[in-house]
Amino acid sequence: MDKIKFDAWVGIFVAIGVISLLGLAMKVGNLTSNDIRETYSIIAHFENIGGLKPRAPVKGAGVVVGRVKSVVFDTKNYHAIVKIDIDKRYVFPKDTFANIYTAGLLGEQYIGLEAGGDTTNLGEGDRITQTQDAVVLEKLISQFLYSKASEEED
Amino acid sequence: MKSLINFFEKIGYSVTSRIKRLGTATRLFFLILISSGESFKRFHLIMKEIYFTGVMSLVIIIVSAFFVGMVLGLQGYYTLQKYGSSEAIGVLVALALVRELGPVVTALLFAGRAGTAITAEIGLMKTTEQLSAMEMMAVNPVGRIIAPRFWAGVISMPILASIFSMVGILGGYVVAVIVIGVDEGAFWSQMQANVDFRYDIVNGVIKSLVFGVACTIIALFEGFDAPPTAEGVSRATTRTVVTSSLVILGLDFILTSFMLGG
């Protein structure tokens, strides 16, 4: 009698625990998103990536289509080589533009992909040739001050 | 002069006795691991202990979780509102609970409720010479009494921590969305966008496993090593709570620095 009571309660306990863990994974976390799908990698070269980090989102038309896999510095061209994993469901043409945008005013940075008009698509290991760097706040301010100063000289 | 020497003697004694106890606790840990096969063969022992440590702690865990979640929702809202980011309340509650408060507060409550129960029970068994009686009957007391409680603690902790996080988020939801009126869609969608399964939830589960091992081994050791008197047992239960709490908080810092740094 006691044994049945113990077993029943322990079973219920473990069941509640597993349900909470699943609930946390599905509802609270982002396990159901495209992180678990198959992806293909492409590369993009940037002169300045700003604050782009690995696992930053890669968006096409604002929808998350992939993640930044890794960021390395190329000692030959002094560029940043960014490797991107894109969900296999989404294909982009070879002349896609890759720009680095900031989410919100001071938020994290992400890569936005804008499709071009090419008929052939990017495959595994291909390189995005058209890129635009991140906006660096200091350069913007110095540009502004310089143009302001030259304005007042006239 | 003599009192100065006495003072240093006392310091030396407390350090050496602490180190000796640490060594004994480690030996007990390995003894438990070796005798675990025996306790898994008699799985009903472990089941019974899971009932006493896990199921009986459910009430305190759920009630505390609900209140912690509600307080997080309330405090978070009033602070975020000043920066116009009150929609981020879901993220705040979820991350705070899943990463830190879930494992740590559950472990502290577990040490207080289940840890002291284990210490008192084993200390009493030692005092009433039940453990020695078992040894005389050629029954391994570590395999029959101590190891099942260890595995029960290790199994119960992550389950309790997940339940804590879930109920806490529910509490935060009740306060933020139902009472205060934050947008429900923003609450859940921001949370889903910002809480990562691998880096937040799985790390939380790993933490709760480590805390489970630490709390349970401390509780078992204090009970096993308690002086076989009533006063000894009661002192041992106090030591369980204090040592467990300090070790939990210390391990929390170490684990967090590994997880966030690496």
Image: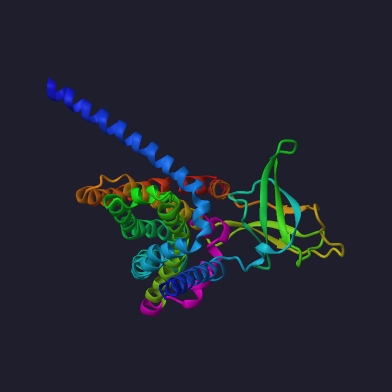
Percent position of residue A63, x then y: 66, 68
Relative to A144, is B181 on the left or the right? Answer: left
Magenta stretch, main secondary structure, is helix
Instruction: In the rendered view, tell whether residue A20 sits above or below residue B13.
Output: below
Percent position of residue A92, x then y: 78, 63
Query: Which of B214 and B67 lies nearest the eye of the viewer?
Result: B214
| Residue at image location 36% in from the left, 64% down from the top | B79
Residue A105: say if magenta.
no
| Residue at image location 39% in from the left, 79% down from the top | B178
Part of the protein shown in magenta: B178-204
Query: Which of A133 and A24 lies nearest the eye of the viewer?
Result: A24
Residue B16 sits in which quadrant? top left
Query: Which of B197 and A118 lies nearest the eye of the viewer?
Result: B197
| Residue at image location 60% in from the left, 65% down from the top | A31
Residue B180: say if magenta.
yes
Percent position of residue B87, x then y: 45, 70
| Residue at image location 48% in from the left, 54% down from the top | B209
